Image: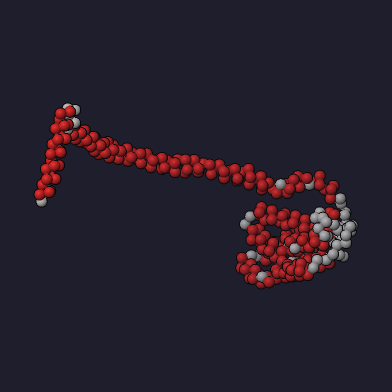
Amino acid sequence: LGAGAVITGLHHHTQNIFEMGGLKKYMPITFIAFMTGAFALSGFPPFAGYFSKDAIVSSIMDKNTLVATLILITSLLTAYYITREAFVVFLGEGHYHEEPHEVEPVMSFPMLILSFLSLTGGFLLWSYFSYLNSDIESPMSFVLHSFYGILVAVIGISASYALYVKKLIDPNTLYELFKPIHKLMKSQFYTEYLYHNIISKGYLAVSKLIYKIVDRIMIDGFVNGLAKIFMVLVRFVWEFMDIRFIDIIIHKLVIWTFSFSRKLKVIQSGYLNQYIFVILLGIVIILGLIVKGMRL
């Protein structure tokens, strides 16, 4: 919300913090809210971020010192970078073509609510966490954990204040000195490389292996096996029904038709006198039936 308020107050002219400065006098409400959020993210007491960071460090310090150390280093860098942003944007001097302005209450009011919670939220659960810690953590351990958390916050905030407000040292001179660390952080501790080149490629390799085993061997083997069984059944049905049943019926029909046609062929002798005799016989029969009908 604070970043959005700054962009709005600058009329969307820039989002580069090094082109800003001196916004404290133009945007006092946003300044208060932004600084409160920055100190909360830094884990500086008594802001809420301190209590959450302290709870995380306390839970891991005695179990894994390396992880706890990495958390503290990350906390130090967070304190440095977030307060650097706040100091550069709101302190110092800035030159603007169009004068910045404070944001409307529709934006400033939610920021103030969150600022209040960032300042007081840690105390809401303090008694609860204290009750839990009383049985599992010694006082000395608790003091050490709290000291480490406060120390890294103070170092980070002091470093950003010294470099970007007091300008005791030019930050560019420190770049070459801490270039390896900068490269490590810029690469996100090589988490992207680890994910894309090891985890992702390993996942794809395992997926291809599973594909070959499950899909090509098991599923395709099952489908091909069913196809072979179906072909055997079809061949059996074909041999039994088509060859032994249907073909026999057709052959019998052909034989019966041929035999019947041979018997009918006797009538068609090809002799004219026989045809005349049959015709006359038919006429006599018809006339006999007519005469018989007339008598009746």
Q: Is residue 139 visible?
A: yes
Q: Position of residue 123 (x, y in %)?
A: 70, 71
Q: Nearer the viewer, residue 288 or 113?
A: 288
Indicate whether 223 appears above or below 73. above
Whether residue 78 sits left or right of residue 241 in the image: it is: right
Query: On the rendered image, what quadrant is the N terminus found in?
Result: bottom right
Indicate whether 168 appears above or below 106. above
Q: Position of residue 85 (x, y in %)?
A: 80, 57
Which residue appears at 10% of the width and 51% of the height? 296
* Residue, far top: 271
Which residue appears at 22% of the width and 35% of the height? 257
Display colour scheme: secondary structure
Q: Position of residue 290 (x, y in %)?
A: 14, 45
Which residue appears at 82% of the width and 62% of the height? 9
Which residue appears at 30% of the width and 38% of the height? 238
Total count of labels? 0
Whether residue 165 sits left or right of residue 33 in the image: it is: right
Q: Nearer the viewer, residue 249 or 104?
A: 249
* Quadrant of the rendered image containing residue 252: top left
Q: Nearer the viewer, residue 202 or 79?
A: 202
* Quadrant of the rendered image containing residue 94: bottom right
Q: Is residue 115 visible?
A: no
Q: Position of residue 246 (x, y in %)?
A: 26, 39
